[in-house]
C-alpha cells in the first residue's frame, strides 16, 4: 500500500499466507471383539482436538459393540478431517459334549458324566454343581453349560436306569418217595444273561435233588447285575 501526503509518498507491504491444511487423522486399536475380548480402546491421533460421532470430545473411545465408529479431528487452524473404522465381532465357536455311560444298573449304581469342551472357563450342571465331571445316581436328564468369556454353549444327556431283577419260577418239585428217589429242579427266569447259584452247590439252571429239604436259587442277570432269590 502507498500513502501520499502532499508531494511525499510512503509505502508498506505485508505478506498474507494460507494455512488450510487439514489434519491427517488416524485411529489405532481396531481389533475384533471376541468371547474373551469384550472391549477395545480406539485412540485417535493426528489432530489437535477430536469429537466422536457419539459426542465424546476426547482422543480415546471405549468400544463394546460391533459397528462403525467415526471421529472428527480439528487442528488449531480450524480445519477438520474425519476418520472411521469398523469394529467386527469374531467370537470363537464354543461347543460342549457329554461322554460317559448313560445307564444306571445294579452293578453300576452310579456313573460319571464327562463334559468336554475345547474352550471353557467353567462348567455348570442343571443342579447348579460345577466342574467338568458329574456323578449321577438317579435317572433323568442332565444338562451342562460351558462358559468361555462371554460365550456359552449347552449339551444334555438322558440317564436311564436298568435295575430290573429277574423273575424266577422253580419247577420240577416233587415228594421224595421210594419210587422217586431224586428229582430235577429247574429255575426258569427272564434274565437276559443269567447266572445261577443254588444252596448246597450248583451253578446251572437245573439242580438234582436226592434229599428232602428247602432249596434256594439265586439268579443274577449279568446284563445289569441285578439278582433275585427263590426257594
Image: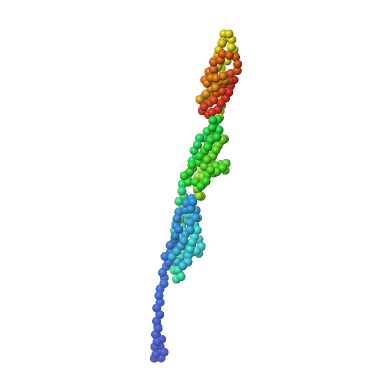
The reply to whether residue 169 is visible in this rendering is no
Camera-nearest residue between 29 and 78: 29
Camera-nearest residue between 196 and 154: 196
The reply to whether residue 39 is visible in this rendering is yes
Which residue appears farthest toward the bottom when viewing the image? 7
Identity of the residue drawn at 56% across and 10% down:
180
Identity of the residue drawn at 53% across and 37% down:
112
Horizontally, residue 206 falls left or right of residue 31, namely right
Which residue appears farthest toward the right when viewing the image? 213
Which residue appears farthest toward the front when viewing the image? 200
The picture places residue 213, in percent across and down from the top left corner, at: 60, 16
Identity of the residue drawn at 45% across and 66% down:
47
Identity of the residue drawn at 44% across and 57% down:
30
The picture places residue 135, in percent across and down from the top left corner, at: 55, 38
| Quarter of the image where the C terminus is located | top right
The picture places residue 178, in percent across and down from the top left corner, at: 58, 8
| Quarter of the image where the N terminus is located | bottom left
The picture places residue 171, in percent across and down from the top left corner, at: 56, 17
State whether residue 129 is above or below residue 30: above
Scheme of colours in the image: rainbow
Horizontally, residue 167 falls left or right of residue 71, namely right
State whether residue 15 is above or below residue 199: below
Camera-nearest residue between 102 and 30: 102
Query: Looking at the image, how many numbered discs can be counted on the residues?
Result: 0
Amino acid at each position: 500500500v502507498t500513502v501520499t501526503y502532499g508531494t511525499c509518498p510512503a509505502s508498506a507491504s505485508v505478506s498474507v499466507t494460507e494455512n488450510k491444511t487439514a489434519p491427517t487423522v488416524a485411529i489405532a486399536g481396531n481389533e475384533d471383539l471376541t468371547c474373551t475380548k469384550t472391549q477395545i480402546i480406539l485412540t485417535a491421533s493426528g489432530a489437535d482436538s477430536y469429537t466422536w460421532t457419539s459426542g465424546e470430545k476426547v482422543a480415546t473411545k471405549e468400544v463394546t459393540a460391533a459397528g462403525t465408529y467415526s471421529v472428527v479431528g480439528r487442528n488449531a487452524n480450524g480445519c477438520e478431517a474425519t476418520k472411521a473404522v469398523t469394529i467386527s465381532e469374531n467370537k470363537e465357536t464354543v461347543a460342549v459334549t457329554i461322554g460317559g455311560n448313560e445307564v444306571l444298573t445294579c452293578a453300576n449304581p452310579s456313573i460319571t458324566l464327562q463334559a468336554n469342551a475345547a474352550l471353557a472357563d467353567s462348567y455348570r450342571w442343571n443342579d447348579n454343581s460345577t466342574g467338568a465331571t458329574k456323578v449321577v445316581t438317579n435317572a433323568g436328564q442332565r444338562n451342562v453349560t460351558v462358559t468361555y468369556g462371554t460365550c456359552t454353549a449347552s449339551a444334555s444327556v438322558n440317564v436311564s436306569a436298568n435295575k430290573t431283577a429277574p423273575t424266577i419260577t422253580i419247577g420240577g418239585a416233587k415228594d421224595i418217595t421210594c419210587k422217586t428217589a431224586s428229582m430235577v429242579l429247574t429255575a426258569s427266569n427272564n434274565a437276559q444273561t443269567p447266572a445261577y447259584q443254588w444252596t448246597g452247590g450248583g451253578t446251572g439252571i437245573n439242580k438234582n435233588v436226592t434229599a428232602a429239604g428247602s432249596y434256594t436259587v439265586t439268579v443274577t442277570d449279568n446284563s445289569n447285575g441285578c439278582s433275585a432269590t427263590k426257594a
